[in-house]
Image (tube, helix red, strand yellow):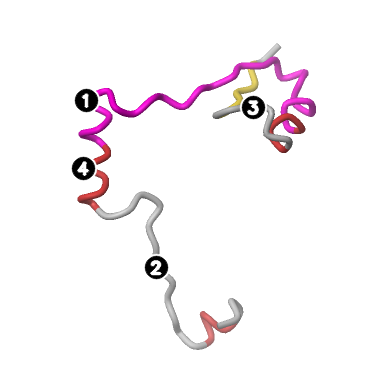
Amino acid sequence: MPLPLIPIMERQVQGSYTGSPADMDELMELIRLGKVDPIPVEKRPASQANETLEDLKNGKIIGRAALIHD
């Protein structure tokens, strides 16, 4: 169904970013047991914002990048 028709036909789209409540409980238990590694965060100065964006696009950064005020 084309997206513009959804409100016209009074349809709803439902989803979940995290899965079911049972999935979330299971995930929290795995975290408590130390079986989930934290997502790495690479800190870079804000002056390197463009380079950082390119590195993210090119898969050169594993995890997340945080820009820090210079």
Task: Give x and y (percent) for residue 28.
Answer: 24, 35
Work out how far the residue at label 4 is from the one at label 2, CA to CA, in angstroms: 21 Å
Badge 4 marks a residue whose secondary structure is: helix
38 sits left or right of 55 in the view: left
In the image, is residue 29 part of the stretch drawn in magenta?
Answer: yes
Verify CB contact (< 8 Å) between mark 4 and mark 1. Answer: no
> Mark 4 or mark 2, which is nearer to you?
4
Q: Mark 3 is on which residue type?
A: Ile
Q: Earlier in the sequence, mark 3 or mark 2?
A: 2
> Mark 3 or mark 2, which is nearer to you?
3
Q: Mark 1 is on which residue type?
A: Leu
43 sits left or right of 40 in the view: right
- Label 1, on which residue? 33
Could you say which is closer to the camera, residue 51 or residue 37? 37
58 sits left or right of 11 in the view: right
Report the residue at 22% width, 42% height from top.
26
Query: Dot 1: within a 10 Å radius of its alpha carbon, few (fewer than 14), some, or many (20 or more) residues?
Result: few
Magenta span covers which residues?
A: 28-53
- Label 3, on which residue? 61
Badge 1 marks a residue whose secondary structure is: loop
Please give the label number shown on residue 14. Answer: 2
65 sits left or right of 11 in the view: right
Instruction: Write down the quadrant of residue 38 in the picture.
Output: top left
Work out how far the residue at label 4 is from the one at label 3, CA to CA, in angstroms: 30 Å
The residue lying furthest to the top in this view is 70
Q: Mark 4 is on which residue type?
A: Asp
Task: Give x and y (percent) for residue 11.
Answer: 44, 81
Q: Mark 2 is on which residue type?
A: Gln
Q: Earlier in the sequence, mark 4 or mark 3?
A: 4
- Label 4, on which residue? 25
Work out how far the residue at label 3 is from the one at label 1, CA to CA, in angstroms: 27 Å
Task: Give x and y (percent) for residue 64.
Answer: 57, 28
